[in-house]
Amino acid sequence: MIHEKPGTYKQVDVFLENTVVLCGTVKSVPVYSHVYYQTQYYRTVLSVVRTSGNEDLLPVEFSYDMVSCPMDEGAWVWVDGSIHTRSKFQPGPVRMDCFVSGHALRLPDELVYKNYVRLEGLLWKQPTFRKTPFERIISDSSIGVYRLHGRKIDVIPVIFWGRNASAVSTYKGGTPLIAEGRWQSRPYTKQYADGRTEELVAYELSIGTFKRVPCSAERRDAATYA
């Protein structure tokens, strides 16, 4: 399912999708992040409240030429974008920076929280099947989605629950999937061997539905013998 040409980059033979739709309120005033090809990018945190009342605080990166609404603290914003990941180099261990890359930011049609993600990519590793301390069944893994030009890949942490967790635990790394769910933040305390602790935040896709999709070779075979 993954083909690699010597001296170039990997390409995949499945159509890949990385779509995020968020609607929430600006939690923090945008701050400068970096310059890329002479375009300045900024970062803010969007507050999206679940139906349970829990709040997800989600980093969003954008340039102001993508914005058509106020970005003041507390302002409602609709974000169309995709999930990006990159290594974050800092003192100590290298960590993964997960954020929403905003393609368009605008005023919402109605002031209702929304959090929807759809990915089509490759299961990046064999899922880890386990039970939580509250006896809930979960499987942790990640989905790899190649960007449009194919030279970079976003490896996105995902979590499956219940029957989904049991089903996906039998899949091998490299399996093509379509998955839909909610992009969420999860604070946790990391305990180090020397007794130190650190408060961190994990970002992951909580998957509501998923299905395996055939690779292009399987689709060709199906068409041949139909």
Image (cartoon, rainbow, N blue to C red):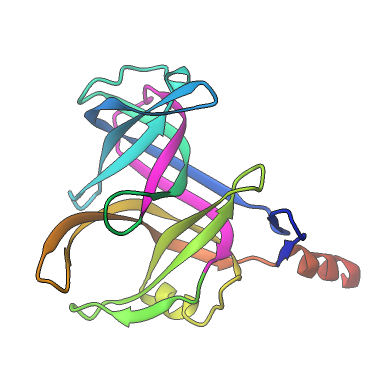
Q: Is residue 70 above or below residue 8?
A: above
Q: Quadrant of the C terminus?
A: bottom right
Q: Give the percent coordinates (x, y) of residue 159.
A: 38, 66
Q: Main secondary structure of the magenta part?
A: strand
Asked whether residue 111 is drawn in magenta, I would say yes
Q: Give the percent coordinates (x, y) of residue 82.
A: 48, 42
106 with respect to 47 (left or right): right
Q: Is residue 51 above or below residue 14?
A: above
Q: Is residue 198 above or below residue 225?
A: above
Instruction: Pick the residue in front: 73 or 35.
Output: 35
Q: Give the percent coordinates (x, y) of residue 222.
A: 82, 70
18 with respect to 110 (left or right): right
Quarter occupied by residue 128: bottom left
Q: Residue at x 12, y 63 (%)?
A: 197
49 with respect to 218 (left or right): left
Q: Which residues are magenta?
A: 95-124
Q: Residue at x 42, y 17 (%)?
A: 68
Q: Residue at x 30, y 21 (%)?
A: 71
